[in-house]
Amino acid sequence: MRRTPSRRLFAATLLVASVLAPVTAAPAAAVHPVSGAAVVGHGEDDCPPGGLGPALTARLDRAIEDVRKRAGIPGVAVGLWLPGKGSYVRATGVADKVTREPMTTDGFVRIGSETKTFTVTALLELVDDHRIRLDDPIARYVRGVPNGRRITLRHLAEMRSGLFPYTSDPDFVHALLSDPRRSFTPEETLAYGFRHKNTFEPGARFEYSNSNLVLLGLVVEKVSGRPLTEFLRDRVLRPARLRHTFLPTGPEFPEPHPRGYTDQTLSGAVVDSTDWNPSWAWAAGAMISDMHDLRRWAKILATGELLSPRTQAQRLKTLPTGHPGLGYGLGIFDANGWIGHNGSIPGYETVTVHLPERDATLVIMINTDITSQGQEPSTPLARAITSIVTPDHVYDGAVQPR
């Protein structure tokens, strides 16, 4: 029987993860620590060398493996850094379901919507350069945007523009899934959304939409006079010393990387989506990174290292999303104190967050986006981990298309 393509990934609406039942004990996990993992945690904060101790490490191993098995996740890589206590950098499961090669923590992954944090950082650097203002209308920079004279750059970054998400258009979904290796231009993707009426007046409410971030990518290009990939490289990635993070121009994917698995297909069958072209997501979700860089980026993003204090304060002014404990600012969320973003793209999911109160950082990378009990699989992992290490700050929400 032919199944209508699920719109959970492409609908670009807010997902708030439902409450997960308490993590139960599981048999000892088959965990594969990565050679050199200790090096990942050294030299960048005051985490003591070594792990978090055998008891806490065992609890985390069991919790992660329990969620991995229940959610059907092939492979999980987790990095957790708790200054003054230690770190946990481990992987479990497989990177390749065919060869059974074990998952590791040193591979590249597609980071999906975490790309938004980089695009908005680039935009905010132009604000600090006094080349744009957040309350400028998008019509000043991009023609043809429905209600573009009233929608501001701030509305776009806050996900409060009212623009119809192009990823919710059935023709777009069919075009992408019919040929997932094809290349899309930003203008092509936006056209799918612009043919629909706006869903609400600017600023009226929150609606997660990739259309917003594709437009902001075009603004960065127009104002800077440079391709977005170059501006990100020179103004964001190099100053942040992120040597393994980039915006690809096509399906390129450096080695090593785990294989990615998705059920976002026209038939609903599970397939290997590793080499799909992420150009359709561009400034909203096409970037690639690794655990080392994401660990650095989590703190840079939360503390505003690349921005002026005034601009960072505006970025962190979160507004309600409709879910208690989850607020969204300028391309960033606050989930019960954890600042950052998650990412989802066919085959991969990530969570990169920082808890300023404890100076703690959590990075999760998995090689599937297939939902389990209506949740994107990275969410119960983050909740299980934070329930153990920061029970007063449990990660309790995720912003992703579902």
Image (spheres, rainbow, N blue to C red):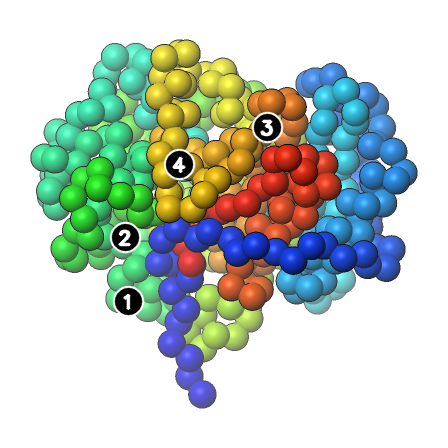
Label 3 to label 1, Cα distance in Å? 38 Å
Marks 2/1 in contact by CB < 8 Å: the verdict is no
The spot of residue 380 in percent (x, y) is 61, 52
- Of the image marks 3 and 2, the number of the one nearer the N terminus: 2
Label 3 to label 2, Cα distance in Å? 30 Å
Q: Is residue 319 above or below residue 4?
A: above
On the image, which quarter does residue 373 sit in?
bottom right
- Circle 3 residues within 10 Å: few <14, some 14–19, many ≥20: many
Mark 4 secondary-structure assignment: strand
- Circle 2 residues within 10 Å: few <14, some 14–19, many ≥20: many
- Of the image marks 3 and 1, the number of the one nearer the N terminus: 1
The spot of residue 197 in percent (x, y) is 14, 55
**Which residue carries the number 4 mark?**
328
- Of the image marks 2 and 1, the number of the one nearer the N terminus: 2
Q: Is residue 216 visible?
A: yes
Q: Residue at x 64, y 30 (%)?
A: 361
The spot of residue 37 in percent (x, y) is 78, 34
Label 2 to label 1, Cα distance in Å? 11 Å
**Which residue carries the number 3 mark?**
355
Residue type at numbered disc 3 = Leu
Marks 3/1 in contact by CB < 8 Å: the verdict is no
- Of the image marks 1 and 4, the number of the one nearer the N terminus: 1
**Which residue carries the number 1 mark?**
170
Residue type at numbered disc 2 = Pro
**Which residue carries the number 2 mark?**
165
